[in-house]
Amino acid sequence: YVIKDNRDSYNYAIKLVAQLLRNQGCKALIADDSVLSRTLMKQMLEKQLFAVSEAHDGRQALDMLKNDAEIKLLMTDYAMPTMDGFELVKAVRNFRGRDDLAIIGLSGASKHGLSARFIKYGANDFLTKPFMNEEFHCRVLQTMEQLSLIADIKESAFRDHLTGLYNRRYFYQYAEKLLKNKNQKNSLVLLDIDFFKAINDEFGHDGGDQALKQVSNLIRTSFSNSTVARIGGEEFAIILTQVEVEQAEKCLNLFIQKFASYDFTISDKTLSITASIGLAEFQNTNLTAAMRVADRALYQAKEQGRNCVVL
Ligand code: GH3
Ligand code: MG
Ligand code: MG
Ligand code: MG
C-alpha cells in the first residue's frame, strides 16, 4: 500500500485499501500553474487510483469542472494567473456542493490566514507546499472518506430499507425538482396493491413483506428508466419523464396485465396479486395538486373493481 511509513498501522492500511477501491476510476483535477507541482501531485493521486486531469490556472479549471460533473476531487493552488485558488473555490461552490466535490487548497506562500480563507470559501482541507508525501496521502484519503460517508448517509436517508426503492422523502424532493422544468411533459403514477390486508392475514406480516419485495422488484425492472419510490405501506409512486399521459396509460395497461399474471411466491406458495393505478399529468402544476389528482384516480380505480388504470 501507498503509505509506507504506516506499515505497522494495520487499521490504517485497511481503511486506506477500502478507500482506494472507492477512488478507483474517480476523477480528480489539479489546478496549479507550476508544471512541476502538477506532475508531482498527479503521480501521487494516480497512486491513489484517481483518473487525473490538469489545469494550468483557475479559469481553465473552472471550465473543466463546469463540463464534467464526475470530477470528485479538486486540488487547487492559491497563486495562479487569471483566476486564483480562492476565486476558483468560490465559483465552483456555486454549482458543486460539499457533498459531491471535495476541494483541497494548496499554497507555497507562507502568508498567514491562507488556509483559513480557503476553508471559509468552501475548501474541505488545506496543504502547505512543500508537503510531506505522507501528509498529502492522508489528507486526500480523509477528504475522500468524508465524501464517501456523506454519500452513504444520503443513500440511507433516501432509500426504503425493506425494498431498496427510493423512499417518500426522496420522491418528494425529486418530484419538486422535476416540476421546475415547465416545458417537460411527465406523468405521475400512483400504484396501490389490491387487498393487501388479505395477504398479510393469510401469510403473516413476514409473508406480506416478502410480497412487497417481489412487487417492488417487478415494478423496478419494468420501469428501469424511471424513478420508482415506495411512498406508503403498499403504495408506490413512479414518475415517467417525457411521457404524455395518454402514452403512459397504454403502457400501464400492459404493465397491469403483466403484474396480474405474474407468479409471486410466498412461503413456497404461488399466488397472483393485482394492483390499481391512478394516473395524472405532471407538468405545470404543484406537487400537492398533482398528488391529489392521481390519488383521486386511484380511488376511482379501486371503486371500479381494482386491477385497472384510471386517468
Ligand atoms: P385495497 O385494495 O383497498 O387497497 O385494500 P388493502 O387491503 O390493500 O388496503 P389498505 O390500504 O387498507 O391496507 C394496506 C395494508 O398494508 C395495511 C397494513 O397492515 C399493510 N402494510 C402496510 N405497510 C406494510 C409493511 O411494510 N409490511 C406489511 N407486511 N404490511 C404492511
Ligand atoms: Mg502558483
Ligand atoms: Mg391496498
Ligand atoms: Mg394503501
Image (cartoon, rainbow, N blue to C red):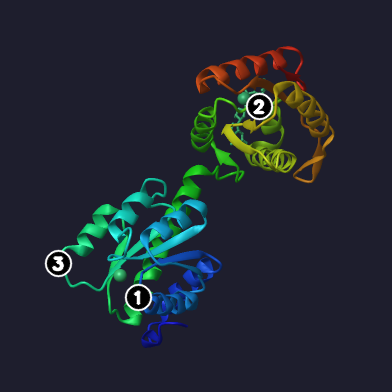
Give the percent coordinates (x, y) of residue 163: 62, 43
Q: Which mark is residue 112?
A: 3
Give the percent coordinates (x, y) of residue 173: 48, 34
Say which amino acid is labelled 1: Phe
Label 2 crowding class (10 Å Cα cut-off): few <14, some 14-19, many 20+?
many
Q: Residue at x 41, y 46 (%)?
A: 95
Camera-nearest label, 3 or 2: 3
Q: Quadrant of residue 132?
A: bottom left
Q: Quadrant of ligand 1?
A: top right
Name the residue nearer the viewer: 37 or 1.
37
Name the residue nearer the viewer: 12 or 93.
93
Residue 295 relative to residue 262: left or right: left
Disc 2 is placed on an element classified as strand
Give the percent coordinates (x, y) of residue 142: 37, 67
Q: Quick one: which residue is furthest to the front in this view?
A: 82
Please give the residue where the numbered disc 2 appears in the rendered image. Answer: 189
Q: Quadrant of residue 63?
A: bottom left
Label 1 crowding class (10 Å Cα cut-off): few <14, some 14-19, many 20+?
some
Q: Earlier in the sequence, mark 3 or mark 1?
A: 3
The residues bearing labels 3 and 2 have C-alpha atoms spaced at a distance of: 58 Å
Disc 1 is placed on an element classified as helix
Q: Is residue 265 above or below residue 194?
A: below
Camera-nearest label, 2 or 1: 1
Q: Residue at x 79, y 46 (%)?
A: 268
Say which amino acid is labelled 2: Val
Say which amino acid is labelled 3: His
Q: Which mark is residue 136?
A: 1
Q: Which quarter of the rendered picture does the C terminus lie within? A: top right
Q: Is residue 15 above or below residue 179?
A: below
